[in-house]
Amino acid sequence: MSDLVLLERRGPVAWLTLNRPDKRNALLREALETLVQQLAAIGPDESVRVVVLAANGPVFCAGMDLGEMQSRAGSPNACAEWQRDSEVYGEALTRLHGLPVPTVAVVQGPAIAGGVGLVAACDLVVASSEASFSLPEPQRGITAAMVTPLLIKRVGPGAAVQLLLSGERWTADDALRTGFCHAVRKPDALNARTESLVNSLLAGSRSALAITKRHVDEMSNEQIASQIRRSMSVSAEARTTPDAREGLAAFLERRKPSWQPD
């Protein structure tokens, strides 16, 4: 298992920490596979009562590693590779969202693209006042398909569509106003608020919290896991278009994309 995602036990609390700060915690497939393995181990462990998702460095997560994504284009089985990337990311989201214990995302800086999905898959979000949230996928010729069901569940379609289509950033206060996050603190107070929240969760019954989580999911029209599975093919398909290739190349080359005419 790689050290791209660290797993630390602090008593009954399992801390998962994204650990690629020099690359803004951009998600390689290897990192997502590690996260999936860690979540698979945490799920049945009844000694775990809360899971905290955090990140090292100033950026929470810049989303999928676009260099790795672009390199898939040169593969003879590019479509299969893109599908596999979508499946691994989708599995990470599904496992994180489906944990029977409360999950807390601690967002100390920008969460971008796939990073927003990781945050949205958690039950509760504590954000630094320096945090921000954005889904720039359309500006790169792709789509945030698997983030969509989680985002809609959290904030509703009206607020979700603004983030999904515009590419604009939500500040931490914007995210608090829409209900995407639950507390905003100055950077030096972030840890204290996280500790307070975790202690409140630990005071609850493990079984009661698990039943509550399941009930909330059942009340959300359709369960998130099935929505994410349906979104995997949408995400992979979006990466095969000429605009996707142009958008990713333009981003990596730091230029404006030249979109195909309608």
Image (cartoon, rainbow, N blue to C red):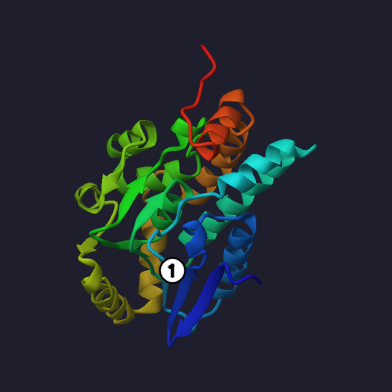
In the displayed structure image, the side of residue 205 where residue 40 appears, left or right:
right
Q: Position of residue 185 (x, y in %)?
A: 20, 65
Q: Position of residue 217 (x, y in %)?
A: 40, 54
Amino acid on which disc 1 is placed: Asn
Residue 222: quarter of image: top left
Work out whether residue 136 or residue 85 is closer to the camera in this orientation and state it: 136
Q: Residues within 10 Å of mark 1 (few under 14, many from 20)?
A: some
Query: In this orientation, does residue 58 appear?
Result: yes
Q: Position of residue 79 (x, y in %)?
A: 71, 36
Work out whether residue 56 or residue 96 is closer to the camera in this orientation and state it: 56
Query: Please, is residue 111 above or below residue 18 in the view?
Result: above
Query: Please, is residue 227 above or below residue 130 in the view?
Result: above
Q: For numbered disc 1, what is the local secondary structure?
A: loop
Give the residue number, with chain letter if any, for mark 1.
56
Q: Quadrant of the N terminus?
A: bottom right
Work out whether residue 256 or residue 206 is closer to the camera in this orientation and state it: 256
Q: Position of residue 150 (x, y in %)?
A: 41, 48
In the displayed structure image, the side of residue 116 where residue 91 appears, left or right:
right
- Count of numbered labels shown in the rendering: 1
Residue furthest to the right in view is: 76
Residue furthest to the top in view is: 262
Query: Please, is residue 87 above or below residue 21 in the view?
Result: above
In the displayed structure image, the side of residue 163 where residue 129 appears, left or right:
left
Residue 238: quarter of image: top right
Q: Residue, x 34% and y 32% (percent of image)?
A: 166
Query: In this orientation, does residue 218 appear?
Result: no
Q: Residue, x 29% and y 78% (percent of image)?
A: 195
